[in-house]
Amino acid sequence: MRRSMEFDYLIVGAGFAGSVIAERMASVFDKRVLIVDKRPHIGGNAYDVHDDSGILIHKYGPHIFHTNSRQVFDYLSQFTEWRPYQHRVRANVDGQLVPIPINLDTINTLYGTSFTSHELEAFFASVAEPVSEVRTSEDVIVAKVGRALYEKFFRNYTRKQWGLDPSELDAKVTARVPVRTNRDDRYFDDVYQAMPKHGYTRLFERMLDHPKISILLNTDYRDVEGILPWKEMVYTGPIDAYFDQCYGPLPYRSIQFRFETQHVKQVQPVAVINWPNDHPWTRVTEFKHLTGQEHESTTLVYEYPTDAGDPYYPIPRADNAALYERYRTLSQERPGVHFTGRLGTYRYYNMDQVVAQSLALCARLAGVRRSELALA
Ligand code: FAD
Ligand code: UDP
């Protein structure tokens, strides 16, 4: 093949991690990019599609965009308009649907009390079990709201979700969910909360629509890396798979999704209901709340966590971090291959964090500051 046909970057994975690099490298630095994904579509786990009933669903589970980064929000805004959306979740606990994150209404509903915020603070202080060092996902919650609430809302959900007890997981897992003493019932408190107006897949189509970007789907990079000429690789798949699991497999948690369409307009009062203590599923999402779509029917997805299947969640624990560190050290011996993304760096990252991480990598590769890059 002629040298001019050479790709500057072979990018493995067309999710947020890979697509941000592809887009910036092509449109800012005029690089020739090939993005390869083994799945039949772009978008990675954020992929959305209309189901047989015409309802827009997220194939790999509910994806709600939220960020505190103006830079990330402005960057993505080049490829989508937004639908303002504040995410709300209820937990089914003791037969009642109550707000999660735990807030003033959660407690007053659950216990039949009429606490004020001030009184609730005193209540939490009276039931909290102080720990000298908050290390695990059990510590985080028990230290804030005590054991009874921990058991009602967190212990069993976490055991289902991760196949591990919260005491076996890093604090940061359950620390994702705040505890409030006011009546704020939003799941996130980020500055920017919105859904891409025409869906994630459309956003990705616009990102990757560039004459310098070629896309190859249904293709494992291993089938082309030795055939097509490229200078550098950006790899966003699981880092242990890249190295043939030479130090042993990194653990991931997977999920089986069961979609159900009902011929009614609406089933749930909010987008997501969490089921900490009953049923084998963790949560049920009704997509129309997220997308704002008008339709006579509605589709829900039930999530059944499992060890087998696609790697969706890195599992935050010290031993896994140590194993990842060994792979990361190995990756430094491959100067022409760059690892990014949730699986490429084994981090429990949200979409916005992955976008920020890939913008940072892109800036580093191009030798510019990140602030110069995002809106160039
Ligand atoms: P991915 O999207 O996983 O993309 C990696 C791509 O690499 C995949 O498409 C894969 O097919 C491809 N690949 C892997 N190996 C190969 C290979 N050998 N050859 C070719 N291609 C390969 N984040 C939020 O911000 N908000 C949410 O509400 C939210 N909800 C989530 C719900 C669930 C159930 C899950 C699993 C995740 C959720 N996330 C959410 C996280 C979000 O999905 C990730 O942060 C983001 O999608 C990660 O992007 P990525 O590009 O790193 O990885
Ligand atoms: N969690 C819980 N009960 C809940 C909600 C969350 O125990 O009702 C714990 C659980 O361990 C979960 C973690 O908090 O994995 C993070 O929750 P989040 O909703 O952020 O999970 P994700 O959307 O990433 O699956």
Image: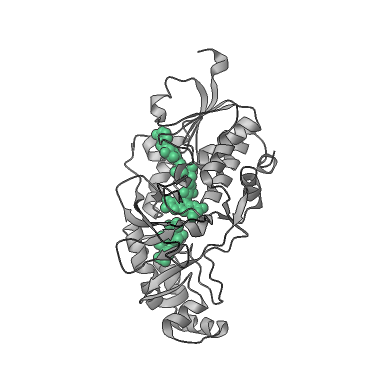
Q: Position of residue 202 (x, y in %)?
A: 54, 42
Q: Is residue 52 visible?
A: yes
Q: Could you say which is closer to the camera, residue 327 or residue 202? A: 202
Q: Position of residue 69 (x, y in %)?
A: 63, 53
Question: Which quadrant of the figure has residue 142?
Answer: bottom left
Please say if 231 is above or below 323.
above
Q: Which residue is at a point 53% across and 73% down the rendered structure image? A: 180
Q: Is residue 171 visible?
A: no
Please say if 302 is above or below 35.
below
Q: Which residue is at a point 51% across and 23% down the rendered structure image? A: 230
Please count the marks in the image.
0
- Name, please, the residue furthest toward the top: 2
Pick the quarter of the image with the C terminus. top right
Q: Is residue 201 left or right of residue 313?
A: right
Q: Position of residue 248 (x, y in %)?
A: 31, 41
Question: Regarding ligand 2, which quadrant of the image does it lie in?
Answer: bottom left
Question: Which quadrant of the figure has residue 91?
Answer: bottom left
Please say if 19 is above or below 121.
above
Q: Could you say which is closer to the camera, residue 136 or residue 235? A: 235
Q: Is residue 29 left or right of residue 139?
A: right
Q: Is residue 360 left or right of residue 45?
A: right
Q: Which residue is at a point 43% across and 57% down the rendered structure image? A: 297
Q: Could you say which is closer to the camera, residue 91 or residue 233? A: 91
Color scheme of the displayed model? one colour
Please say if 26 is above or below 269.
above
Question: Which quadrant of the figure has residue 170?
Answer: bottom left
